[in-house]
């Protein structure tokens, strides 16, 4: 089951369908009543999150740039053990033998995890992302399409990196911070801030409040 029926969930559905029968996708769960009983890209929206079937494995596929803490809220609300969450990796992604991807995380098409990369739980890694040696991406982070991390980068819990962002080696992006699309991060980004530009600089407080 995929929780959410927006763009990220639709892309994840196509990942599951491309996985050569490894996953049998039942459909979507979404708390928007207008979507219940409809088809999204040919797959049913079976109801709200409360309609999760017993023993079905799931992935929470939500998180817009203006509300990227939604996965955390849903996972906390469900209160399920880690083994109920699937880990989905597109068949065209390259994940090295020394790299790890946590439960509930999604690695989309054409991504590369080169060596000793650690991706936590409930992380969204969108298409064409490159994570290089010794990078750490903590739980609930979002790595949008085309992001490139140099070696030894740490993306803290819940941070959001916009499409095409670049991060210099050995830098840290703080928890729940947001890096704008196309930005070049040459300095550490503190917790809870929005940075953007080339080089990236502080703009304003982050739009999310995960508590």
Image (cartoon, grey):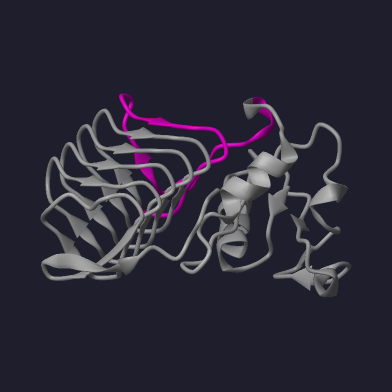
Q: Residue 63: horizontal and vertical position, in percent?
A: 54, 60
Q: Which SS does the magenta portion mostly show?
A: loop
User: Residue at 69% across / 31% down in the picture?
Assistant: 84
Quarter location, residue 115: top left
User: Residue at 78% across / 50% down in the picture?
Assistant: 26
| Residue 73 painted magenta | no
Q: Position of 51 compared to 133: left or right?
A: right
- Say if 145 sits above or below 114 in the image: below
Q: Residue 11: horizontal and vertical position, in percent?
A: 56, 62
Q: Position of 136 compared to 100: left or right?
A: left
Q: Residue 55: horizontal and vertical position, in percent?
A: 81, 31
Q: Position of 141 compared to 45: left or right?
A: left
User: Residue at 39% across / 38% down in the picture?
Assistant: 138
Quarter location, residue 128: bottom left
- Which contiguous range is marked in magenta? 83-110
| Residue 105 painted magenta | yes
Q: Residue furthest bottom?
A: 34
Q: Residue 156: horizontal and vertical position, in percent?
A: 34, 42
């Amino acid at each position: 089951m995929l929780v959410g029926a927006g763009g990220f969930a639709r892309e994840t559905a196509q990942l599951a369908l491309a996985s050569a029968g490894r996953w049998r996708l039942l459909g979507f769960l979404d708390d928007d009543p207008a979507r219940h009983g409809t088809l999204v890209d040919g797959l049913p929206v079976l109801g709200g999150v409360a309609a999760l079937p017993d023993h079905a494995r799931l992935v929470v596929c939500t998180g817009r740039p203006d509300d990227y803490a939604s996965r955390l809220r849903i996972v906390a609300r469900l209160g399920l053990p880690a083994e109920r969450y699937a880990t989905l990796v597109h068949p065209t992604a390259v994940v090295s033998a020394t790299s790890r991807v946590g439960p509930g995380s999604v690695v989309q098409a054409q991504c590369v995890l080169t060596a000793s990369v650690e991706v936590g739980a409930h992380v969204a890694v969108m298409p064409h992302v490159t994570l290089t040696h010794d990078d750490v991406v903590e739980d609930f982070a979002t790595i949008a399409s085309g992001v490139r991390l140099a070696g030894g980068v740490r993306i803290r819990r819940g941070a959001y990196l916009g499409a095409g962002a670049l991060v210099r080696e050995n830098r840290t992006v703080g928890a729940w911070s947001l890096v704008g699309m196309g930005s070049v991060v040459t300095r550490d980004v503190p917790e809870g801030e929005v940075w953007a530009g080339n080089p990236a600089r502080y703009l304003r407080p982050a739009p999310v409040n995960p508590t």
